[in-house]
Image (cartoon, grey):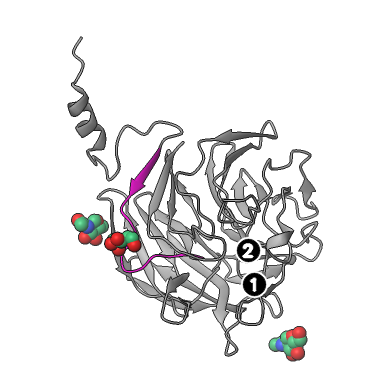
Amino acid sequence: MHFPSPLTFVLTGLTPVHGLCTPCKRGIWQDAAPIPIAPRQEHTTVALSPSTLAILGGIVPSDSFYSTTDMMQLYHIKNNSWTSAASIPLPLNHANAAVVDGKLYLLGGLAVAPDGAWRAVPDCWVYTPNNNRWSAISPMPNGTARGSAAVGVHEKTIYLAGGMTTLDIPGGGYQDSVDTLISFDTHSGKWKTHLRQNLPEGRDHAGSAVIGSTHYVLGGRYFGQQGKRDTVFSLDLRNPDATWQTSPARMPTPRGGVSTGVFGSEIYIFGGEGNTEAGSNGVFHETEVYNVASRTWAKMAPMRLPTHGTSAVTVGHRVYIPGGGIHQSANPVNNTEVLCI
Ligand SMILES: *[C@@H]1O[C@H](CO)[C@@H](O)[C@H](O)[C@H]1NC(C)=O
Ligand SMILES: *[C@@H]1O[C@H](CO)[C@@H](O)[C@H](O)[C@H]1NC(C)=O
Ligand SMILES: *[C@@H]1O[C@H](CO)[C@@H](O)[C@H](O)[C@H]1NC(C)=O
């Protein structure tokens, strides 16, 4: 048998055949191309297609602390590179977004109010990749605007569970949590408020996934950093009379500001903030995996670069985690971390 020399092996291993190093071995972290222009935090990540990811909005460093951006950038998996796309119509952080039938729906988020606080706006838009254009769609129902919701897609409908309406950093950091469920039917273009399906407790900055027809809301927080949670809530989206269930299996490490990957019956919860252990910078490095079939938690390779305030997306056997903050509250980075699963 022929074994390649260690040098050949290293070179082969690092050749970006389809953008990233191959092979993709479960539990191995890799680096994809960093986000150009500016590091990013509190942005939203989606897969526009199996070959293109998008990051929307978020905050970037500026002369006056941080500013909220309207940038949208695309990551191309095949050539491991980024391009810019049409800006989102309003600078937003903690935006809610999802892709249905190849179109990108941006359903509100937090905008900078005149007093400098971040407050939820109900405005919604749809983006069509073919012509790189945004257009307005029905806003969220009166009184239900939110950012940082647990977003899930089932069939043609986008569900927004929980979220927050206010994050007032200049005013001392007050933040709230929402417990309501609303949904947007991309087919009819109409919103619905699910009056009987409030979450058992308000949540924002939570993990979120839909597997089969069940929406899961994992961890997150309740009224701020001190309210970090370890719960797993689930709702059967097929049954209009169903209510949220709380799994007896709690997330091993309670945290908010997490990002989420989904693969088969597994939900990966990455990083987050609210870590009070000395030397942690307030950021968690944990990767914890919930198996929805066995209702058990397992630990997996921790993040090499622990982050919070980002959002992840799974394509094939890889979870992509662009940007995020490496200190509690702030310090955005441009790194794009990838975990093979
Ligand atoms: C990413 O951030 C690092 C550290 O700040 C910087 O040196 C590098 O130029 C940035 N990369 C890009 C593509 O902007
Ligand atoms: C990567 O692919 C995208 C999509 O095809 C293209 O727009 C972009 O120019 C390519 N970038 C490089 C560096 O080849
Ligand atoms: C929205 O709700 C507010 C109170 O929450 C009310 O004052 C206002 O009239 C409502 N607007 C519409 C269009 O229903």
Name the element at disc 1.
loop
Q: Nearer the viewer, residue 260 or 116?
A: 116
Q: Nearer the viewer, residue 324 or 292?
A: 324
| Residues marked 2 and 1 touching at CB (< 8 Å) | yes
Residue, x 64% and y 56% (percent of image)? 274
- Left or right of 47? Residue 300 is right
Q: Quadrant of residue 190?
A: bottom right
Of the four image quadrants, the one with ligand 3 is: bottom right
Label 1 C-beta lies within 8 Å of the nearest ligand 3 atom: no
Q: Amino acid at mark 1?
A: Arg
- Left or right of 135? Residue 120 is right
In the image, residue 257 sits, relative to residue 216, either above or below, namely below
| Residue 13: x %, y % from top left | 26, 33
Counting labels gives: 2
| Residue 281: x %, y % from top left | 55, 56
- Left or right of 236? Residue 2 is left
Mark 1 packing: few (<14 Cα in 10 Å), some, or many (20+)? many
Residue to which mark 2 is pinned: 149
Q: Amino acid at mark 2?
A: Ala
In the image, residue 29 sits, relative to residue 218, either above or below, namely above
Range shown magenta: 29-42
Q: Tell me the tag on residue 146.
A: 1
> Which quarter of the image is occupied by the N terminus?
top left
Question: Residue 37 magenta-drawn?
Answer: yes
Q: Quadrant of residue 103?
A: bottom left
| Residue 95: x %, y % from top left | 54, 69
Mark 2 packing: few (<14 Cα in 10 Å), some, or many (20+)? many
Residue, x 64% and y 46% (percent of image)? 213
